[in-house]
Image: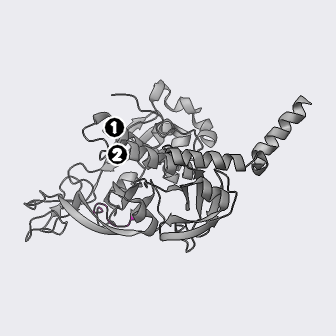
Amino acid sequence: MAEKRDYYEVLGLKKGASDDDIKKAYRKLAMKYHPDRNPGDKTAEENFKEVNEAYSVLSNADKKSKYDRFGFAGVDPNAGFGGGGQGFGGFGGFGGFGQGFGGFEDIFDMFGGFGGQSQSRRANQPRKGRDLQKAIAITFEEAAFGCKKTITLTKNVTCSTCKGDGAKPGTSKSTCPKCGGSGQVATTQRTPFGQFQTVNTCDQCGGSGKVIDTPCSDCGGSGRVRKKVSITVDIPAGVDNESVIPIRGQGEPGYNGGSAGDLYLVLNVKPHQMFRRNGADLYLDIPISFDQAALGAEITVPTLDGKVKYKIPAGTQPGTKFRLKNKGIKYLKRDDKGDLYVTVNLEIPTRLNGKQKKAIEAMAQEVDEGCYQSRSSFARKIKEWFE
């Protein structure tokens, strides 16, 4: 079996990274390796599992604390303390508990419990269902104004025949003969420090304390079946590319009466053919002719809300940027909008007939260098330099 990589290394982070950094790194990598984006790619699938495993530990304050202190031994009951042959000695023996461990309860918790207070006892408690993630594509306009989308995905759902019980309708579960209904099996281990009792989840009933004598024919006793479902969701106005929208309760069913997981939609916003976006602000380039730039003109500016008229002043230079307030995109979770920044670029004619050329030449003779502010300033600088 390949050696596990450090969880921080998996997410491309350093130890001590903040919760926000961990969340951002996870979203980026989860989207990169998601099976929907890499169909048939086994390497991407393994990377996706590795990223999810790392996030499941580092996003949980308790698990993260134990992982930071003890490494994999703090979060994997099967890892133990024997890595490298050090045993307890690697932590300085009992004398080092005050420095290396949080106290005896940490030791018992990592060994699986003592006196019945183990993690396996929690296996029979209600647990939230698995979260799901799905990428969807929307248009630039849908992101700007919001929309409704109906998405289809295949997931585990509660079996409608047995209502999630797992037993065939008309039958019931019986007490597990191995654990006597406790859902746990205790074993005693001898160690250099005495006897330790380890309580593990019963492998016959899976911790439920009940066994199914006659499983449901539709779900085989699992209480859930794979099904294609359609969900209509509201995409709020102002979302951007790679925005993540949580849909609560639309993940997979919980366990032992626990709540359902959540569905996370990752948005891919298609680029617009004219507008560029930076947050809530929009940017647009508009070509203007020489006479419009020189004499000033009223130009038509396209916006997401429709066309508007804008008066550019005489003598407008190529590359001048104008600001149209509140013509951008609505801020997410706010009522106001960003702005539209319009950059005007001088369009030079490329095909001229003889008459048009003569007209331009005549104009050039009439317009001397004094009319050009930049050219006049440059000529003055050259003259001063030579003098």
Mark 2: few/some/many CA within 10 Å (<14, 14-19, 20+)? many
Determine the main secondary structure of the stretch shown in magenta.
Answer: loop
Q: Quadrant of residue 284?
A: bottom right
Element marked by disc 2: loop
Q: CA distance from mark 2 to mark 1?
A: 7 Å
**Residue located beneath label 2 in the image:** 34
Q: How many discs appear? A: 2
Q: Which mark is residue 100?
A: none
Q: Is residue 13 above or below residue 253?
A: above
**Residue located beneath label 1 in the image:** 44
In the image, the segment drawn in magenta is 247-255
Q: Position of residue 232 (x, y in %)?
A: 30, 69
Decide which of tag 2 and tag 1 comes sooner along the chain. 2
Q: Position of residue 40 (x, y in %)?
A: 24, 38
Q: Amino acid at mark 1?
A: Ala
Which residue occupies 60% across, 55% down?
343
